[in-house]
Amino acid sequence: MPRTLITGGAGFLGSHLCDRFIAEGHEVVCMDNLITGSTDNIAHLAGHERFRFVHHDVSQYIFLEGPVDNVLHFASPASPIDYLELPIQTLKVGSLGTHNCLGLAKAKGARFLIASTSEVYGDPLIHPQPETYWGNVNPVGLRGVYDEAKRFAEAMTMAYHRYHGLDTRILRIFNTYGPRMRLDDGRALPAFMGQALRGEPITVFGDGSQTRSFQYVDDLVEGIWRLLHSGEHEPVNIGNPDEVSILEFAQEVVALTGSDSEIVHKELPADDPKIRQPDITRARAVLDWEPRVDRAEGLRRTLEYFREQVRA
Ligand code: UDP
């Protein structure tokens, strides 16, 4: 039975990965310090014979007894307001945390997968963004703590691959949404759905002409599963190329919820990327992967979750 460590396993993405790996018959060790994750996300796995939760900050040395086959490093504050509030922790988990996870993978002879991000492309000057684009990142800007930590994490991963021969994967995740996002994580979708469901004004930053390309979490999880089982060591974008302006996205949420909330405009945060769309040619070719859930369907599924959250 393969044994997989998932750091950040109590977070939005990490908890969906725990579900998938348990369903695939793995033994799963979920490690999280719960600064942005929550045991609510994994409560349904508690007591499962192949699931174990370890409360630990992976920026500190990781002790884990027994064999490990896969290390998936997903621990990090990941929404702009989280990493603005936790800048040092964000830098540490991307750098020291990645180093500790790589060290563990090397000691155990495990495969290693790093959750990187479309933020490595910064405010991109090339559109859509292929993996070969080196990016346009402001290292000293507010988002630099996240972007540079992930860029360092990628560099460190390639160094372990080249120098130690570690079997590594680099996953560049584009905007992903779905159940278990935190209502208060500040990202566009939870903000808009929470506001619409409470009948509050919908806060669109700037004029809303900036674009994003949103993928449903199940598509991402499938991409991760395929990447882990591929032989690809170069970075792979996983995202849905279906691009939308933030204003249009807000209008879709209002229409879907049937809310009478009005849209108001707030100041655009510093270094907010103007456009973002994954070029998924590599994922198609190497993983035979592409997204399956369209936005209308994904938003419906996510709304059900947020309705419960707002009621609670
Ligand atoms: N955004 C917005 N209103 C909000 C939250 C976010 O208009 O209440 C905008 C934000 O400025 C950005 C886009 O929505 O242009 C996506 O933001 P998010 O925080 O979801 O992700 P990221 O900027 O990391 O892609």
Image: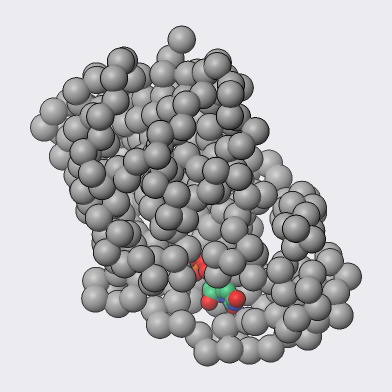
* Residue 302 image position (x, y, % from top left): 73, 53
* Residue 50 image position (x, y, % from top left): 52, 18
Residue 93 drawn above or below residue 159: below
Residue 24 drawn above or below residue 178: above
Q: Nearer the viewer, residue 227 or 177?
A: 177
Residue 55 drawn above or below residue 256: above
Left or right placement of residue 251 versus residue 279 in this view: right
Q: Quadrant of the C terminus?
A: bottom right
Residue name at image x 60 percent, y 45 percent: 40
Residue 134 drawn above or below residue 210: above
* Residue 212 image position (x, y, % from top left): 56, 66
Q: How is the image coloured?
A: one colour
Which image quadrant for residue 141? bottom left
Q: Nearer the viewer, residue 260 or 243?
A: 260
Which image quadrant for residue 115? top left
Please say whether residue 219 is visible from this viewpoint.
no
Left or right placement of residue 266 versus residue 165 in this view: right
Please say whether residue 30 is visible from this viewpoint.
yes
Q: Nearer the viewer, residue 300 or 174?
A: 300
Residue name at image x 63 percent, y 89 percent: 265
Residue at the far top: name it.
1
* Residue 56 image position (x, y, % from top left): 34, 41
Residue name at image x 59 percent, y 66 percent: 184
Q: Quadrant of ligand 1?
A: bottom right
